[in-house]
Image (cartoon, grey):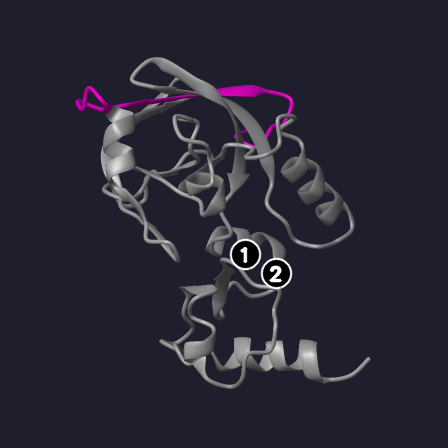
């Protein structure tokens, strides 16, 4: 079980690129406002199970570009089905490897998510993994569950609907125009092709303007 927190998993990421980390760095871009990254094809072994043609990229916002110069323990995302449709491990298609930025204990996220889950609030499951790039030990990482359709199906009566990722916002009311929110949110799932963001704007309105 990939989210067995009592096990330190082992994940090997390998590539014909001899400077794999430099290649991942070259495919991550931060322009001062937004961060974008593209996958590169790698082979990945998770606890002895081998997968070829897997997508790997750097991820993160401040946890990535906010690191000091020379620090290489960047956060990564593995997409097992990026190039091979349906490929998964333990039912999971994407593996988030969080670097514990500003948290040397690596416990802030796991404890927070556990408190939320035990309080009845859906939150990602977590575990830990030793990560290797081209057989070089890269560090101990937090495996965090991807909030995808599988996550929604496990935690909600209906996996359909619009889903948004918050990049940098305190849910402030910024008016009724979609353009006011696109710098702080990303629409990860569209229901029936809906890209109006009307539900997110309505929710933000209620949070800020409905009184006590």
Gap between marks 1 and 2 measured at Cα: 6 Å
Q: Say if 182 sits above or below 76 in the image.
A: below
Front-lying residue, 189 or 31:
31
Front-lying residue, 179 or 95:
179
Residue 86: image location, x then y, percent = 32, 44
Residue 92 in view, yes or no: no
Residue 148: image location, x then y, percent = 47, 53
Q: Which residue is mark 1?
A: 153
Residue 21 in view, yes or no: yes
Mark 1: few, some, or many residues within 10 Å (few <14, many ≥20)? few
- Quarter of the figure with residue 58: top left
Q: Which residue is mark 2?
A: 156
Q: Residue furthest front?
A: 69
Left or right? Give the position of 7 relative to 9.
Answer: right
* Extent of the magenta region: 1-19
Q: Overall secondary structure of the magenta stretch?
A: loop
Q: Say if 141 sits above or below 187 in the image.
A: above
Front-lying residue, 23 or 131:
23
- Whether 58 is among the magenta residues is no
- Whether 6 is among the magenta residues is yes
SS for tag 1? helix
Q: Quadrant of the N terminus?
A: top right
Q: Residue furthest left?
A: 16
Left or right? Give the position of 47 relative to 157.
Answer: left
Left or right? Give the position of 35 relative to 139.
Answer: left
Quick check: marks 1 and 2 in contact, CB under 8 Å?
yes
**Badge number at residue 109:** none
């Amino acid at each position: 079980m990939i989210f067995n927190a009592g096990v330190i998993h082992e994940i090997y990421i390998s590539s014909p690129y001899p400077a794999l980390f430099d290649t991942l760095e070259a495919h991550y871009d931060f322009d001062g406002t937004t961060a974008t990254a593209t996958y590169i094809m790698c082979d990945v072994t998770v606890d002895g199970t081998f997968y070829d043609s897997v997508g790997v990229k750097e991820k993160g916002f401040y946890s990535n570009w906010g690191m000091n110069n020379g620090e290489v323990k960047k956060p990564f995302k593995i997409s097992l089905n990026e190039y091979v449709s349906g490929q998964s491990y333990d039912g999971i298609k994407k593996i988030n490897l969080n670097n514990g930025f500003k948290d040397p204990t690596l416990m802030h996220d796991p404890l927070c998510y556990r408190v939320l889950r035990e309080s009845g609030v859906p939150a990602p499951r977590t575990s830990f993994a030793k990560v290797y790039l081209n057989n070089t030990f890269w560090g101990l990482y937090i495996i965090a569950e991807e909030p995808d359709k599988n996550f929604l199906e496990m935690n909600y009566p209906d996996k359909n609907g619009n889903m948004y990722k918050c990049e940098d916002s305190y849910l402030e009311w910024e008016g009724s125009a979609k353009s006011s929110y696109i710098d702080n949110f990303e629409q990860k799932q569209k229901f029936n092709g809906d890209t109006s963001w009307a539900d997110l704007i309505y929710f933000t309105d209620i949070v800020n303007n409905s009184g006590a």
